[in-house]
Amino acid sequence: MSDQQQKPPPATSGHINVFWEDGMLDHYTGEGVFDSGINPGFLDVLEKHPENSDRVRNMLSILKRGPISPFLSWHSSSPATLTQLLSFHTQEYIDSLIEAEKNGGKMICGATFLNIGSWNAALLAAGTALSAMKYILDGHGKICYALVRPPGHHAQPTQADGYCFLNNAGLAVQYALDSGCKRVAVIDIDVHYGNGTAEGFYRSDKVLTVSLHMNHGSWGPNHPQTGGINELGEGAGFGYNLNVPLPNGTGDNGYKYAMTEVVVPAVRKFDPDLMVFVVGQDSSAFDPNGRQCLTMEGYRAIGKIIHSLADNHSNGRILIVQEGGYHVTYSAYCLHATLEGVLNLPNPLLSDPLGYYPEDDSFAVKAVESIKHHHKQVVPFLREVVDH
Ligand SMILES: [Zn+2]
């Protein structure tokens, strides 16, 4: 990737440093009936596993050839080292993944396939998130985006889950703490609960994990967490994991409402010195894995809110980490819109080719009101937060 290496730009907030490595395309997840890896023989045309390299190829190409390209510069990374992995995961767990690849690969847990090439891709994804974080911490840039796969936010310290092996964002957050950051806020808008990241910092008051997700609940032993409002953290970390489970069909206005009513007041109070924005375009209106109905406009608006929070609290510093997003076209477009928002551009650069259905935010508003009420009653650091 050295041909893409550019001189570091000045550390302004009008620019995003993208970190990417081609080797992440080598993670092959198979095909079958959706993400099952199984072919019962009923269909002539099988589809690729939703977490396939095509989705990320399109994210890569829209950023290189779309109208946002002049605002981006490109950077390479190296694979994460074992020592780095042990800052979040256990040795035993890492050994089990290495062993699985050595034996030719297997399904590690439901719909989560580790094949030959997957481990190297996972190490590159973790290394890419770490390199992007280091770039910010070293003062070279304020906004960095780690375009990574396999995704990471379901990976718990001792457990793979939901297409994830290594927690890319979690490793980067731990690295920031080890480098002297005092408080890191993680805002996760992937359609699924960021249970792995939450689990990693569940007993810490130095990391505020906030996850906005579809109200999907637990999905088995590899994902025992429900993502409900009562999973608030433990010990010193009590109150520092805020779940915002949103009704199906929440849409752009519902997400904006959840951001302004729940996320913004909590981040204001927490006052982080670094923001980590965990993005998944599977909360879009056309994703096979989600029902949340965001369009490009909604992603753009959320990006702008993150920009403004970072400006007020973390000196503009934001690490963006890629997670899910499975519609091969719309995920790329929604990513483009998200980054436009994070750059706080005054006008959209790209029009929406798909998002044209009307939405109904009345259920979402009701759910957000009740989540807000709950947090104010039970979370100690939010008790004095006044309505605005
Ligand atoms: Zn997801």
Image (spheres, grey):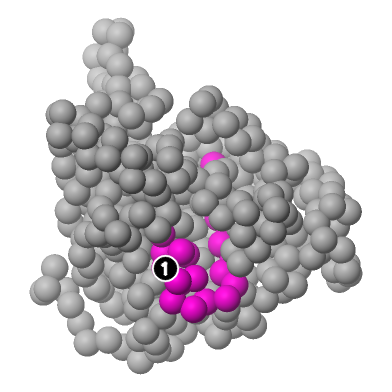
Which type of secondary structure does the marked residue at label 1 adopt? helix
Q: Quadrant of residue 136?
A: bottom left
Q: Quadrant of residue 73?
A: bottom left
Q: Is residue 202 left or right of residue 265?
A: left
The amino acid on which the numbered mark 1 sits, given as a three-letter code, is Tyr
Q: How many residues crowd around disc 1 within 10 Å: few (fewer than 14), some, or many (20 or more)? A: some
Count of labels shown?
A: 1
Residue 59, percent from left and from top: 32, 56
Q: As drawn, is 259 to the left or to the right of 144?
A: right
Residue labelled with disc 1: 175
User: Between 211 and 307, which is closer to the camera in this rendering?
Assistant: 211
Residue appearing at x 31%, y 70% in the figure: 131
Direction bottom: furthest residue: 10
Give the x, y percent position of residue 72.
33, 76
Taking depth in this image into account, of 193 and 18 the one nearest to the observer is 193
Residue 199 in view, yes or no = yes
The residue stretch that appears in magenta: 171-192
Q: Is residue 184 magenta?
A: yes
Determine if the magenta segment contains residue 258: no
Q: Is residue 271 above or below residue 147?
A: below
Residue 372 seen by the camera: no
Question: What residue is shown at x 73% (from left), y 56% (from top)?
Answer: 239
Q: Position of residue 187 (x, y in %)?
A: 58, 60
Image quadrant where residue 137 sits: bottom left
Q: Quadrant of the N terminus?
A: bottom left
Residue 183: image location, x then y, percent? 59, 72
Q: In the image, 323: left or right of 307?
A: left
Cβ(mark 1) to ligand 1 < 8 Å?
no
Q: Quadrant of the C terminus?
A: bottom right
Question: Compared to 170, does 7 lie above or below?
Answer: below
Tell me the residue at 48%/30% (across/down).
222
Q: Residue at x 59, y 63 (%)?
A: 207
